[in-house]
Image (cartoon, rainbow, N blue to C red):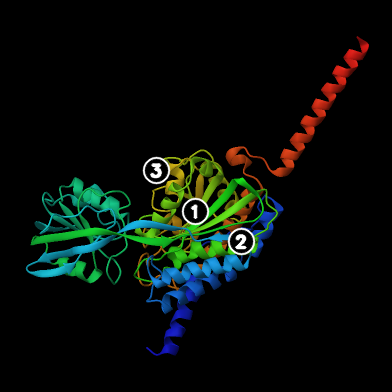
Amino acid sequence: MSGRSKLAAVLAISALVAAPTATASAASEPAGPALAKKLAKKVTVEGVNRHLIAFQRISDRNGGNRAALTPGYNASVDYVAGKLRDEGFIVSTPTFDFDVMVTDAERATVAGVNYQALILTASPQTPAGGITGPLRVVPEDATTGCEATDFAGQDFAGSVALIRRGGCTFEQKHLNAAAAGAIAVLVSNNVAGPLSNVTLTNPGVIPTGGVSQADGTTLATKAGSPVTVDMRFHTEVRTERNVIAETRTGRKNNVVMAGAHLDSVELGAGINDNGTGSAALLETALQLGSRPKVDNAVRFAWWGAEERGLIGSTKWVESLTFEQQLDIALYLNFDMVGSPNAAYFIYDGDNSDGVGAGPGPYGSAQIEKAFADYFAAKGVPTEGTDFSGRSDYGEFIAQGIPAGGLFTGAEGVKTAAQAAKWGGTAGIAYDPCYHAACDNLGNVDRVALGRNAGAIAFVTASYGVSTEDVNGVPPRAKRAEARATAAKVQSAAHDHDHSHLAVA
């Protein structure tokens, strides 16, 4: 295909993904501070999209990705930090050290043929020489390996389970396989290319590796054959950077914090994951400015090495003293806010859905309501999503800091009810290019991105004015009014006492 034809194809795809994913009813102005209303109008999808173009070009100029420990990530840090410094923010790029896996063996061997099996983050290793068992293939459907019943009808005891990606988390697939008796798991990609930079989230119970879509299809024809899985590594220390920027105005002991991870996976540019969250946050910061009229300082963060296990955010929070953590009123997290088959998810702060991890710390329910109220005023229906531990809110919640945020979906599958409510296509992933090379500028629903960018701006600015509903700290005007009232009461009491003495 010629360069001109490629460009035409990209523009055609962009036009399709930019189509509305939901038909909103007549929108009204959300209730809130004037600053929030003004900022939500100033943060436009055009401004956010310009940063996405920058991230794509940075990736293209630096080996095709923006992953941690690569030139593409360094260039992304410099781009974001430079924009913020030009706007006058107090900017730092604190470093953190972390262990990286250096591969010793990553293969599955059947009949003398080796297939690359990339070790999932948080997977245990095999012993030297690997482990061997019969290959059992889990039948494919929209949620392969996501239910215990998927493993019925075969003897998985002592086997290596081959499971196609999609429909639920890698962790759930491997736990179901382990419960069925498997001694190892191979997850095959559902899009072209290797399955890399993915995680079990929590420490795994059996060795779990990822194979490419093509190798998975080939291996599926070898069901019942003995397979040896050899996946081993050692660790070495590396250093990476976060980006932290704070307004010069507002209280420093009641800071409103908002963050997004800046790194991509190694397979591609990561424009939805998480260029969209990073770009929306950056445009919010730039339009807010470094000296806004806020009661509370606003601190923005772009995290590094999220794709390696939430490392940048975790290390940063752990570096704070208890008093410094107390200075953070709340944390807002934005990871994937423009998925091409978008959902409108808000983190379930009050656990009203009753799914998964439970509620966030006190104040998280109020944050959820703030986002829900904004979307309701805009006529956009929303759903809750669990604090599953898959993004950078994790360590904030662990330390008792209230948290919330937005998410448009990853490898989960959109239901028919959701498609009826929001548009898009039922039965496929919210982001079919999640952690894949095709996560580029054509992989964004810009209607969803614009709506989420408006919500990010509105709620962030609202908490910059007051966090009273979250932690009881009132805005400046209310504090001044309370002081004035107290002074009047004290003065009246003094006058009463003076009068009483005079009569005596």
Regarding residue 430, the answer to whether it shows in the image is: no
**Badge 1 amino acid:** Asn
Q: Is residue 371 left or right of residue 216?
A: right
- The residue where tag 1 is placed is 333
Amino acid, disc 3: Val
Looking at numbered disc 2 in the image, what kind of residue is underneath it?
Answer: Phe
Q: Quadrant of the N terminus?
A: bottom left
Name the spot of residue 266 as percent of width and height, x first: 35, 68
- Residue depicted at 64% across the width and 58% down the height: 26
Mark 3 sits on what residue? 355
Assign a secondary structure to mark 3: loop
Q: Earlier in the sequence, mark 3 or mark 2?
A: 2
Residue 384 point in image, percent of width and height: 47, 48
Residue 353 appears left or right of 473 = left
SS under mark 1: strand
Residue 347 in the image, given as x and y percentages of width and height = 47, 49
Q: Which image quadrant is residue 27 in?
A: bottom right
Quarter holding residue 68: bottom left
